[in-house]
Image (cartoon, rainbow, N blue to C red):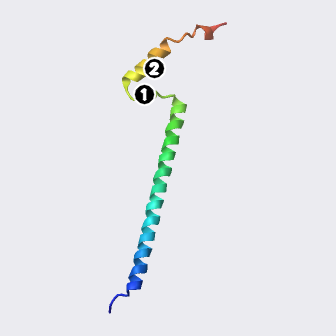
Amino acid sequence: MTPNPELCHQSSLLLKSELVKEVTRSVEEAQLAQEVKGKVLQEEYQEFCQTKGRSLYTLLEEIRDLALLDVSDSYVM
């Protein structure tokens, strides 16, 4: 029994197309997961107003800037 070359060719094309579909699907899922993660992070930032900086120094700079704000106008009776 010798393998049919046409059958092998069709089989390899089918495997390639399945592989392409699988890779495309996994890439789309990864992109969707990244978008969801970005939205969650943005919502958390808006909810908790977390600092944009990534270091303690930038956090302390933001606090210093807030301390310099004039809030006396907000306490008018």
Secondary structure of the residue carrying numbered label 1:
loop
Quadrant of image for the N terminus: bottom left
Identify whether 24 is placed above or below 39.
below
On residue 53, the disc is 1
Camera-side residue of 9 and 76: 9
Q: What residue type is labelled 2?
A: Glu
The mark tally for this picture is 2
Identify whether 72 is placed above or below 50.
above
* Left or right of residue 57: residue 75: right
Identify whether 39 is placed above or below 47.
below
Quadrant of image for the C terminus: top right
10 Å crowding of disc 1: few (<14), some (14-19), many (20+) = few
On residue 62, the disc is 2
Q: What residue type is labelled 1?
A: Gly
Locate residue 60, reporting x and y percent: 41, 19
Is tag 1's residue or tag 2's residue first in the polypeptide sequence? 1
At x 43%, y 75%, the residue is 13
Camera-side residue of 17 and 34: 17
